[in-house]
Amino acid sequence: MERIAIIAITKNGIKMAKSLKEKFSAWEIFAPEKFSDDDKRINWYNNSTTIKIKELFESNDGLICLFSLGAVVRLISPHLKDKKTDPAVIVIDDQAQFVISALSGHLGGANQLTNDIAEQLGAIPVITTAADVNKTIAVDLVGKDLGWKIDDDSNVTKISAFMVNAEKIGVYQNCGVKNWWKNKLPENVSIYSNINELKKSQSKGYLIISDEQINNEILENAVVYRPPSLVIGIGLHWDTTKDKIIEGLDASLQKFNLSKKSIARFVSIKKEKDVVGLKKVAEEMNIPLEFFDRSDLATIKTPNPSKMVEGYEGTASVSEAAAIKSSGGNLIVEKQKFPPDLTTVSYTHLTLPTNREV
């Protein structure tokens, strides 16, 4: 979390806020001006706490409230929107005995923040989300720390209910870090090697971790996760347009049944002039862009080298060589041609470290 605010409304709460500030220096403290002791570390406010809570709720990733849970509920309730956008809200009692995860425990990170604060204060963390209490998989958090995206979150609540009620859950994975669940899998969760086995398992719900498009009736009871697994090599002219690149990208993704949400990065050859079209695509899709010198690409062995490309670029391969060079993996889609000005698009799987901490 980048922005975390502490709000205290009692003298003892302000003392506790200062203690928290010593342990979490980037956090900002807010307190009523009537308690001001001219401490420059504190933002003293002279409007009502009701108004200040609204301001802090809307402008921070996390809100640490050093007063009663009931008061916090009344103050934040008019501003609640949804669990994907609401900030984490933590409540700490006036004697710092309990640290309570009050809002956005999973997606907002309140549960983790609660544990972090409780450890520093020597307090008892209070976490009530079912997945945490039952020591099972939090469906909405699978792969979040690894950059995975949920393809469609409409089934998250339903599959979460299956999970915490120990209904049979089937898992299929064809890409991404394998040890995403650090502990022993819950007894109600089983892994299957392919979609057909998953379907035959007659599980109540499914977790599918894949960069492939899934067209199957099991999607009605599934959550699909998209790891950033695809490295896309692109060979093009310096003036190839954004629209042409997107056209080739969409066509190749559809042809090979791959998901756009699993693109890890675009890679290509470093040219004398910036390829504006490619930079625009990367910026609009919020996907990293990497370039290699021709001398680096010329050393990469590829299945489809071209004498013509070598004459223009100084290397016999651009898209395939760049994809292999960047990913450390093997081609899963050899170069696809989109003449005249988008020459090739190639795909590799990103080689992953065996240790997820790397």
Image: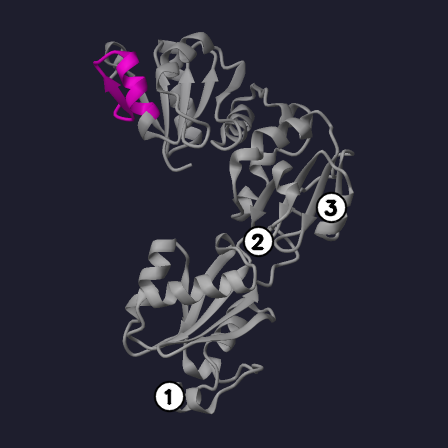
Q: Which label sits in the foreground, 3 or 1?
A: 3
- Residue 258 x %, y %: 55, 58
> Neighbour class for label 1 at 10 Å: few (<14), some, many (≥20)?
few
Q: Amino acid at mark 1?
A: Tyr
**Residue visible at 29% across and 26% down?**
41
Q: Amino acid at mark 3?
A: Leu
Q: Is residue 1 above or below residue 11?
A: below
Of the pair 51 and 215, the residue shown nearer to us: 215
Residues under labels 2 and 1: Cα distance? 36 Å
**Residue visible at 50% across and 15% down?**
96
Of the pair 17 and 273, the residue shown nearer to us: 273
Question: Regarding mark 1 in the picture, which secondary structure is present there?
Answer: helix
Q: Is residue 61 above or below residue 90?
A: below
Of the pair 202 and 78, the residue shown nearer to us: 202
Please state, as top left, top right, bottom left or bottom right, where the C terminus lies in the image: bottom right
Q: Name the residue that disc number 3 marks.
A: 198
> Could one spot residue 38 in this view of the protein?
no
Q: Count up the numbered dots.
A: 3
Question: Regarding mark 2 in the picture, which secondary structure is present there?
Answer: loop
- Residue 53 x %, y %: 32, 18
**Mark number displayed over residue 213:** 2
- Residue 190 x %, y %: 76, 41
Q: Name the residue that disc number 1 marks.
A: 312
Magenta residues (range) = 38-57
> Could one spot residue 21 in this view of the protein?
yes
